[in-house]
Image (cartoon, rainbow, N blue to C red):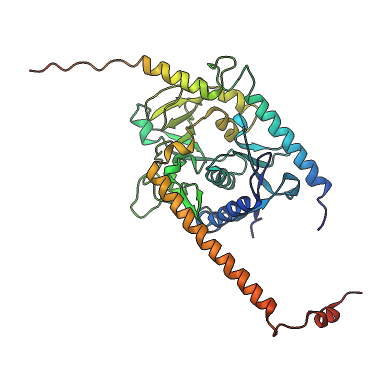
């Protein structure tokens, strides 16, 4: 039996209602249990907490904050245990889902998996070669346009282990939603990172314009063009990657129509939940008013302690 | 309700301190995230500036002569 993982969703310094934290935690828990675990074989719960002091000492926190700047993303505490920092925004559930799933697939930010160089990079002139990818299950399809909903809450798409397959097969799924439809494909707004064993440099293919190029896609030599190697000496691979990678906001990928559809789904879920809550209140009220319920005083005496 | 343990409170304190350090580093007027950033420039401003510069150096498309 594997040791189950407990993640703690908690806000810090930002006014998120306990109701919202609870709803998002429930959605993430369901996403992990129903969607992620059957594919990646990782068992975990995501529990809501009102403040950091409430978080069990062995839980891995996902902390929602404002103005996090370069602190956003994955980190390790002084005992080497993982935690994530999520920037509060109107799509914070999507970011929280992203960090949750990546922490579960690679808890210590250094898991590598072999595969061929992405086709998109080969078309740009890179040699066909066997390289080592950093396992970041949400980055290739991180844009909000590829997100889906669980219980009316927006959550991130993620790739499957088949993402690293050498060739495409029609009976395989490369990401949960199917948005990625071939191995090592990077979608609009996304990126993947790999180590080239020949040059010993780290690279990324980026499907968004940035300070290095406005062409999409383009490849960035992280070891040469950024401070990546400096950060790598201070922290783990994923944290170093997070420091030098600044993709566009998730919202930029969500078109007006897609946003409207997402909002309609959220509204209809909220309506159903409200109706259910009222149904439960009515059922409890009916039970309390019922003359048929057992006498509570008699049963207390029988069970009484001391 | 059981009280929160001293260990939980201590861990919360340590996490806040660590996040504070990370955020402060990111707001450093002499940033180290990218060696090409100018002092006082935020990462967002830097990316926008570079993209404008890249657009300006794009070569114009050659004109196709009509037969």
- The outermost residue toward the bottom is A292
* Quadrant in which residue B53 is drawn: top left
Q: Could one spot residue A177 in this view of the protein? A: yes
Instruction: Say if A135 sits above or below A225 in the image.
Output: below
Q: Residue at x 57, y 70 (%)?
A: A279
Tell which of A296 and A83 is nearer to you: A296
Residue A252 drawn at (x, y percent): 44, 36
Q: Position of residue A24 (x, y in %)?
A: 58, 51
- In the displayed structure, A205 sits above or below A103; it is above
Q: Does residue A78 appear anywhere in the picture?
A: no
Q: Quadrant of the C terminus of chain A?
A: bottom right
Camera-side residue: A54 or A137?
A54
Horizontal arrangement in the rendering, residue A302 relative to residue A86 (left or right): right
Residue found 30% across the figure and 15% down from its top:
B59
Above or below B13: residue A176: below
In percent of the image, x 55 and y 31: which residue is there?
A241
Task: Tell me if A145 is positioned left or right of A246 in this view.
Answer: left
Number of numbered discs overlaid on the protein picture: 0
The N terminus of chain A - image quarter: bottom right
Image position, residue A305 (x, y; %): 88, 74
Where does the image place residue A10, in percent across and percent down from the top left?
A: 66, 46
A300, A167: nearer the viewer: A300
x 55%, y 17%: residue:
B35
Residue furthest right in the image:
A306
Question: Looking at the image, which is closer to me, A99 or A123?
Answer: A99
């Amino acid at each position: 039996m594997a040791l189950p993982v407990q993640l703690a969703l908690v806000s810090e310094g930002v006014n998120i209602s306990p109701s919202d934290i609870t709803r998002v935690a429930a959605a993430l828990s369901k996403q992990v249990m129903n969607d992620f675990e059957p594919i990646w074989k990782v068992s975990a719960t995501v529990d809501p907490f009102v403040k950091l002091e409430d978080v069990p000492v062995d839980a891995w926190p996902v902390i929602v904050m404002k103005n996090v700047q370069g602190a956003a993303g994955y980190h390790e505490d002084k005992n080497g245990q993982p935690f994530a920092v999520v920037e509060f925004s109107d799509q914070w559930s999507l970011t929280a889902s992203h960090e949750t799933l990546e922490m579960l697939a690679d808890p210590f930010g250094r898991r590598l998996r072999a595969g061929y160089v992405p086709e998109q990079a080969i078309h740009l002139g890179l040699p066909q070669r066997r390289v080592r990818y950093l396992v970041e299950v949400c980055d290739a399809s991180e844009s909000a346009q590829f997100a889906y909903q669980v219980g009316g809450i927006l959550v991130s798409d993620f790739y499957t282990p088949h993402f690293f397959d050498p060739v495409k097969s029609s009976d395989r799924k490369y990401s949960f939603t199917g948005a990625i439809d071939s191995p090592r494909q990077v979608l609009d707004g996304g990126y993947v990172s790999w180590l080239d064993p020949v040059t010993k440099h780290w690279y990324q293919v980026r499907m968004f314009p940035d300070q290095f190029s406005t062409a999409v896609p383009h490849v960035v030599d992280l070891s040469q063009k950024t401070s990546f190697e400096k950060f790598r000496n201070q922290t783990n691979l994923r944290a170093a990657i997070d420091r030098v990678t600044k993709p566009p906001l998730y919202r930029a990928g969500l078109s007006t129509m897609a946003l409207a559809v997402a909002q309609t789904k959220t509204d209809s879920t909220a309506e159903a939940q409200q109706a259910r809550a009222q149904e439960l209140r009515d059922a409890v009220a009916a039970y309390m008013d019922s003359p048929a319920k057992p006498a509570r005083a008699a049963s207390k005496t029988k069970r009484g302690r001391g | 309700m059981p009280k929160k343990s001293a260990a939980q409170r201590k861990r919360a304190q340590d996490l806040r301190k660590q996040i504070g350090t990370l955020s402060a580093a990111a707001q450093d007027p002499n940033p180290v995230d990218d060696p090409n950033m100018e002092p006082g420039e935020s990462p967002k401003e830097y990316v926008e500036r570079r993209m404008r510069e890249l657009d300006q150096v794009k070569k114009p498309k050659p004109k196709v002569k009509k037969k």
